[in-house]
Amino acid sequence: MVKRNMRIAGTLLAVMLITAGCGAAAGNGGKASSPGAASGSSPAPTTQTAAQTPPATAAGNAGQGKQLFASNCASCHSVGTDKVVGPGLKGIFHKDKLPNGQTLTDANVGQWIKTGDASMPGNPALNSSDLANLVAYLKTL
């Protein structure tokens, strides 16, 4: 029964994430991609201060990753250690392996976010820039 409910919840989440990605592609708020990614223009300024915005890294922008996390991941994951639907992600980059057994690398984390596995639905609507931004943000936790 629990497995069935988790599968239903995972399916609903996947549908919501895919729908959000489709809306972004049609110009509906850009929730599934980073600001300016589709148009090539620079991102719109935000009202966050430097203290609130995580730093950009060579591989991605943690500030944009934080926004993507809030709109795509926070319904299942906390930024602390508390489990929501999935585990809290604080300190994930201090581990040796992902829960699926893969070595913890930027590429493996990004691939898992995009494709998911039996324990987590992926988000195929995220592009490589979005994934780099999410990984950069996860590194700040």
Image (cartoon, rainbow, N blue to C red):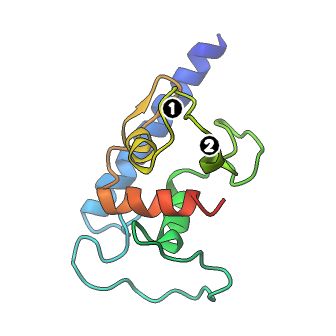
Which one is earlier in the sequence, the residue at label 1 or at label 2?
A: 2
Near-viewer residue (114 or 16): 114
* Residue assigned mark 2: 76
Disc number placed over residue 6 in the picture, else none: none
Mark 1–mark 2 CB contact (< 8 Å):
yes
Residue 133 position in % (x across, y down): 44, 64
Query: Which residue is painted at 38% across and 47% down in the image?
Result: 107
Residue 51 visible to the viewer? yes
Query: Which residue is painted at 32% across and 44% down in the image?
Result: 124
Q: Counting other residues with Cα less than 10 Å from the Cα at mark 2, is it few (<14), some (14-19), or many (20 or more)? A: some
Residue 83 shown left or right of residue 86 in the figure: right
Residue reaching furthest to the right: 82
Considering the image in quadrants, where does the N terminus appear? top right
Residue 22 shown left or right of residue 5 in the figure: left
Residue 4 position in % (x across, y down): 57, 14
Residue 47 lies in quadrant: bottom right
In the rendered picture of this protein, how many numbered marks are placed on residues?
Answer: 2
Residue 34 versus residue 122 in the image, above or below: below
Residue 21 position in % (x across, y down): 34, 54
* Residue assigned mark 1: 120
Query: Which residue is painted at 25% across and 61% down in the image?
Result: 25
Residue reaching furthest to the top: 1
Query: Which residue is painted at 68% across and 84% down in the image?
Result: 51
- Kind of residue indicated by mark 1: Met
Near-viewer residue (130 or 26): 130
Q: Distance of mark 1 from mark 2, alpha carbons?
A: 9 Å
SS for tag 2?
loop
Considering the image in quadrants, where does the C terminus appear? bottom right
